[in-house]
Amino acid sequence: MNFDNMLRYCALLEQHNDRAWFHEKENYKLYTAAKSDFTELVELLKFRVASVASPDLAEGLIFADAKGLLYRIPRDMRVHKNQPPYNPSWRADLSAGRHIEIPIGYYLRIQPGGRSHFGTGAWCWEAEQLFQVRSRISLHFGEFLDALDASGCALWGDKLKKVPADFDPLDPAAEFLKYKSWLVSRDFADAELTDFEAFGDLAAETAERMEPLRQFFNAALAGPRRDPLRADDWDAR
């Protein structure tokens, strides 16, 4: 098992990103072969990641159907109106199920040109979720920094210019409260995508380092809504 079919297909699809090419018989055979390989990879990674994840994720991940964890290559054109019809990458949500928000899982993308990555984090769609994550970061800032440092990765994600109105701009965690999504990821060069077993080792090693941060965000989203901190609360922490 290797990545050749996946990388080759993504490169071709990026060059010929239209419906006629996608549905041409020989090209569709390439697609189904590459998708089969990616499904095998996700099946392997389920168990590798579960071996280092806490029980809140591990049990659901082990019993999840690998096919149900895959993202579709065709884009939803109702949302992506001005983009090509296909996303030339193989993507999966390594979790209890792709439509299950909690517990947070791990995200995998395989795409040529050094654009492959593996990571985790909190991607919030609702204002209440944003409030929960920001509140936990503010209340447990030291724990957050330790978990981020253990991941060995830089934090990235969409960010506001100012601290949200619910929080004080003098909060020591102020810069991290500006984020709208809190993500960490490890990038992989094409040369690192050799056989599935070797990649499984890399993914498990990466997940083990990211696990404290995943648990931190998961606790934030699974927990109750909290009141915003006042400046005179900081000394009490």
Image (spheres, rainbow, N blue to C red):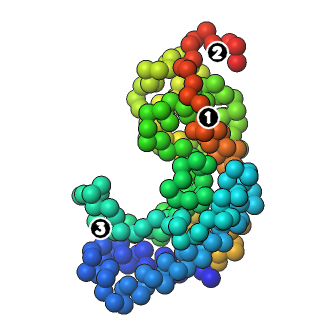
To which quarter of the image does residue 237 belong? top right
Instruction: In the displayed orientation, state which residue is furthest to the top.
Output: 232
The answer to whether the residues at label 3 and label 1 have Cβ atoms under 8 Å apart is no
Residue 156 marker: none
Position in image of residue 65 (x %, y %): 59, 69
Q: Which of marks 1 and 2 is in front?
A: 1
Residue at the (46%, 65%) spot, across then down: 71
Mark 1, Cα crowd under 10 Å, few <14 / some 14-19 / many 20+, is few
Mark 2, Cα crowd under 10 Å, few <14 / some 14-19 / many 20+, is few
Which residue lies under the disc numbered 1? 223
Give the Cα separation between the discs numbered 3 and 2. 49 Å
In which quadrant will I find the N terminus? bottom right
Residue at the (41%, 87%) spot, across then down: 29
Left or right: residue 38 versus residue 25 is right
> Which of pointers 3 and 2 lies earlier in the amino acid sequence?
3
> Is residue 202 visible in the rendered structure shown here?
no
Give the Cα separation between the discs numbered 1 and 2. 21 Å
Q: Nearer the viewer, mark 3 or mark 1?
A: 1
Which residue lies under the disc numbered 3? 85
Q: Is residue 212 above or below residue 27?
A: above
The answer to whether the residues at label 3 and label 2 have Cβ atoms under 8 Å apart is no
Position in image of residue 179 (x %, y %): 48, 35
Mark 3, Cα crowd under 10 Å, few <14 / some 14-19 / many 20+, is some
